[in-house]
Amino acid sequence: MPLFDRVKSQAAQLAQAAQEAGKAGQSRLAEAQARKRADDMLRSLGRAVLASRTGRGTDGTEAEIERLIDLLTQHEETHGSLVEGGEDEDDRSEGHVGGITGRGVTDPGAASPPGSANPVAPSPALGTDGS
């Protein structure tokens, strides 16, 4: 087999490998974007439910809750369950509770040292003025 034919064959193999890698990367990107959309919808749903349950909701809060539940149900039909086994290894890491990292969120079942307080500032997104 002449040298040119071997080089041509290797180039074709490399091109095919690059295409497969590109497709895998696009798939991972699409999955990450879907997880981000779900996280955003779940966060919005949580804020709406909190506002509704604490008497800070508006006339449209219940409709927004229903809309978000419908969107999340559609998302689950396409991408799989958000509840059962939906956690990645990264989600189970230390300090990651309920899908939210940082921001002063702690495990409600964790024991606090005696005399320590865990103050929680009111969220401006919920329309509270802190009083």
Image (cartoon, rainbow, N blue to C red):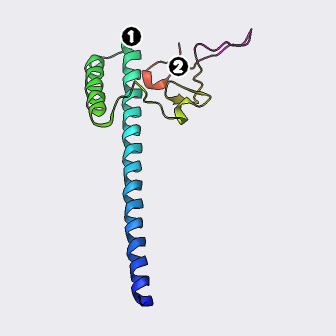
Residue 93 is tagged as: none
Q: Residue at x 47, y 30 (%)?
A: 87
- Reply yes or no: does residue 117 show up in magenta: yes
User: Which amino acid is tagged 1?
Assistant: Arg
x, y percent for residue 16:
37, 68
User: Which amino acid is tagged 2?
Assistant: Pro
Name above or below for residue 38 compared with residue 18.
Answer: above
Q: How far apart are marks 1 and 2 (CA)?
A: 15 Å
* Depth check, front residue: 17 or 102: 17
Quarter-of-image position of residue 82: top left
Q: Earlier in the sequence, mark 1 or mark 2?
A: 1
Quarter-of-image position of residue 86: top left
CA neighbours of label 1 inside 10 A, class few (<14), some (14 to 19), many (20+): few
x, y percent for residue 103:
57, 28
Q: Which residue is drawn at 61% across and 28% down?
A: 95
* Depth check, front residue: 110 or 115: 110
Residue at label 1?
A: 53
Q: Over which residues does the magenta segment extend?
A: 108-120
SS category of the residue bearing label 1 = helix
Residue 63 appears in the picture as rendered: yes
Name above or below for residue 46 compared with residue 31.
Answer: above
x, y percent for residue 39:
41, 33
Q: Residue at x 43, y 77 (%)?
A: 10
Residue at label 2?
A: 122
SS category of the residue bearing label 2 = loop
Name above or below for residue 28 compared with residue 106.
Answer: below
**Residue 73 falls left or right of residue 111:** left
Quarter-of-image position of residue 49: top left
